[in-house]
Image: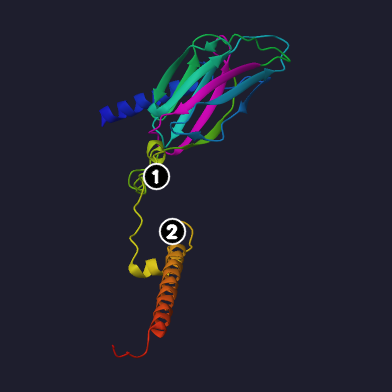
């Protein structure tokens, strides 16, 4: 029991250190305001990093340097799935990251390059993303502005949902992909298919003068028939003339015989 109590006390102390670091006091200073000016409406697991922008302003008549710290608490996704990059004009800005349970603190290693004065703001920009295997849930951001000596000036908070991967038990089976012809297959020349053979009925049904069919024999048949008729008529006339000639010769012969003397 003593060991469990000691472990619980150590965990609470670590979490408290995350909440209060780097400031020595939890109370905020009057005359300062921290606002989130750009908060993503949602984060997608495996999607492109999105931007979180925070601005601190002051109504004090003195100028100070600021050190930024960002608390991020996840509900659903694992903390290891959270990726946070601090951005300045010259590129990435050095930070240190502390984690405890579901909470991570990302603190600037150096003071912000800007200077906070009355009528002049200081901005912190973060690029945030989640790994592709992150679960669905939400993330709570709590940006804080500290002075050079670690005094908390002001803080604010904002929440965004995280759209992650569905649990394996609830995933619906995806339909098997349907094989589609590749471009090379679709560009092939069409295959020549043989035409069906025609039956005798089909051949008789085709008109003699139909376009594209075999040449008609009607014309040559008529010509040959006419020639045969002409030859036949000529033969008949010739036979008739021979018959008449024979009759004339027969009529010219004597009809009786005279006795010889």
Residues 245 and 41: in front is 245
Q: Which residues are magenta?
A: 122-151
Instruction: For mark 2, give the secondary structure.
Output: loop
Identify which residue is drawn at 43% across, 31% down. 46
Q: Is residue 40 above or below residue 218?
A: above
Label ID, residue 215: 2
The relative height of residue 172 versus residue 102 in the rendered view (above or below) is below
Q: 27 left or right of 15?
A: right
Q: Work out whether residue 127 or residue 57 is closer to the camera in this orientation and state it.
A: 127
CA–CA distance in space, label 2 to label 1: 31 Å
- Per the image, the residue denoted by label 1 is 190
| First of labels 2, 1 by sequence position | 1
Q: Position of residue 255 (x, y in %)?
A: 37, 89
Q: Residues within 10 Å of mark 1 (few under 14, many from 20)?
A: few
Residue 90 lies in quadrant: top right
- In-front residue for pair 138/190: 190
How many other residues sit within 10 Å of disc 2, few (<14), some (14-19) or many (≥20)?
A: few
Q: Quadrant of residue 233?
A: bottom left
Locate residue 44 relative to residue 113 in the image: left or right: left
Q: Mark number for residue 23? A: none
Q: Is residue 164 magenta?
A: no
Quadrant of the drawing holding the N terminus? top left
């Amino acid at each position: 029991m003593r060991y469990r109590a000691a472990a619980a006390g150590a965990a609470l102390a670590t979490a408290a250190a995350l909440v209060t670091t780097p400031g020595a006091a939890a109370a905020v200073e009057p005359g300062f305001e921290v606002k989130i000016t750009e908060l993503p409406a949602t984060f997608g697991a495996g999607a492109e990093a999105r931007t979180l922008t925070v601005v601190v302003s002051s109504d004090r008549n003195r100028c100070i340097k600021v050190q930024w710290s960002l608390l991020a608490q996840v509900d659903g996704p694992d903390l290891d799935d959270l990726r946070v990059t601090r951005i300045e004009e010259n590129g990435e800005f050095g930070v240190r990251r502390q984690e405890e349970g579901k909470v991570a603190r990302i603190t600037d290693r150096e003071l912000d390059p800007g200077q906070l004065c009355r009528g002049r703001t200081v901005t912190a920009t973060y690029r945030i993303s989640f790994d592709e295997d992150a679960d669905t849930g939400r993330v709570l951001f709590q940006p804080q502005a500290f002075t050079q000596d670690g005094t908390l000036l002001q803080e604010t908070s904002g929440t965004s949902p995280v759209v992650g991967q569905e649990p394996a038990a609830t995933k619906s089976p995806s339909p098997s992909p349907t094989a589609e012809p590749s471009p090379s297959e679709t560009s092939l020349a069409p295959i020549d298919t043989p035409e069906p053979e025609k039956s005798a009925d089909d051949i008789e049904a085709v008109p003699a003068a139909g376009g594209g069919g075999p040449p008609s024999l009607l014309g040559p048949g008529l010509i040959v028939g006419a020639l045969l008729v002409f030859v036949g008529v000529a033969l008949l006339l010739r036979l008739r003339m021979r018959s008449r000639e024979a009759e004339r010769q027969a009529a010219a012969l004597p009809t009786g015989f005279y006795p010889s003397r």
